[in-house]
Amino acid sequence: MKEKRTDSADKRRYARFPVGGFVGPITLRLDSRDKVSQPAVLTDLSAGGLSLVTFIEPPHSKKIEMILSLPGLKSVSVEGKVARVIEKGQTYKVGISFTKIDKKHKALIDSMALDNQDCDIRIALKLPEVCVRDCRFHHLCAKPQKAAYWKK
């Protein structure tokens, strides 16, 4: 008998992490000829996709090509599809699920998300050593505990 879920538990396959306030032009390539560039705010990222806020309605395309360039992730080429669009006033929260991403980049993004989760657990437990030197989320971390740790 298959268990029926009645709660609204998170069904995401990959851990995600916040990309707090990274603002920049996002270039979406709808096919090999067209390019649409628009300002956007990347809000979170996982090995399975990303979420961003745009100020112009996103294209309704089956295939989107993007280059991710973030601290710790330089020029990562991904393909995806729009999974959801939530309009709020004059902004759009857009969820994009990856359909093509290099295995090594997928593993790196997943390890960044897991390191961020580990950090959050150490913070919640009020452990003395919150930051660790081999944290792969380090480049994107904006937590106040990071600043305190690196002043030592």
Image (cartoon, grey):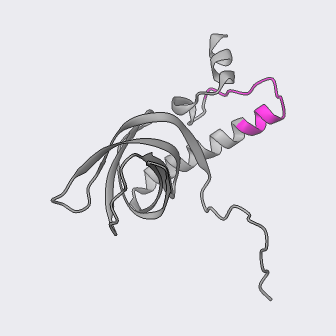
Quarter of the figure that contains the N terminus: bottom right
Tell me the residue at 22%/63% (across/down).
Answer: 31
Prevailing SS of the magenta stretch: loop
Q: Is 142 drawn above or below residue 83 in the view shown?
A: above
Closer to the camera in the image, 21 or 106 = 21
Q: Total label count?
A: 0
Q: Which residue range is magenta in the image?
A: 120-133
Q: Is residue 77 magenta?
A: no
Residue that extends furthest to the bottom in the rendered view of this protein: 1
Residue that extends furthest to the front in the rendered view of this protein: 89
Q: Is residue 122 magenta?
A: yes
Q: Is 30 drawn above or below residue 152 in the view shown?
A: below
Image position of 24 (left or right of 34): right
Q: Quadrant of residue 34?
A: bottom left
Residue 16 position within the rendered picture, expressed as x and y whole percent measured from the top left: 59, 49
Q: Quadrant of residue 59?
A: bottom left
Residue that extends furthest to the top in the rendered view of this protein: 152
Closer to the camera in the image, 102 or 30 = 30
Residue 88 position within the rendered picture, expressed as x and y whole percent measured from the top left: 51, 52
Tell me the residue at 15%/59% (across/down).
Answer: 33
Image position of 123 (left or right of 86): right
Residue 37 position within the rendered picture, expressed as x and y whole percent measured from the top left: 27, 46
Quarter of the figure that contains the C terminus: top right
Image position of 124 (left or right of 36): right
Tell me the residue at 57%/41% (across/down).
Answer: 18
Q: Is 128 drawn above or below residue 85 in the view shown?
A: above
Q: Quadrant of residue 72?
A: top left
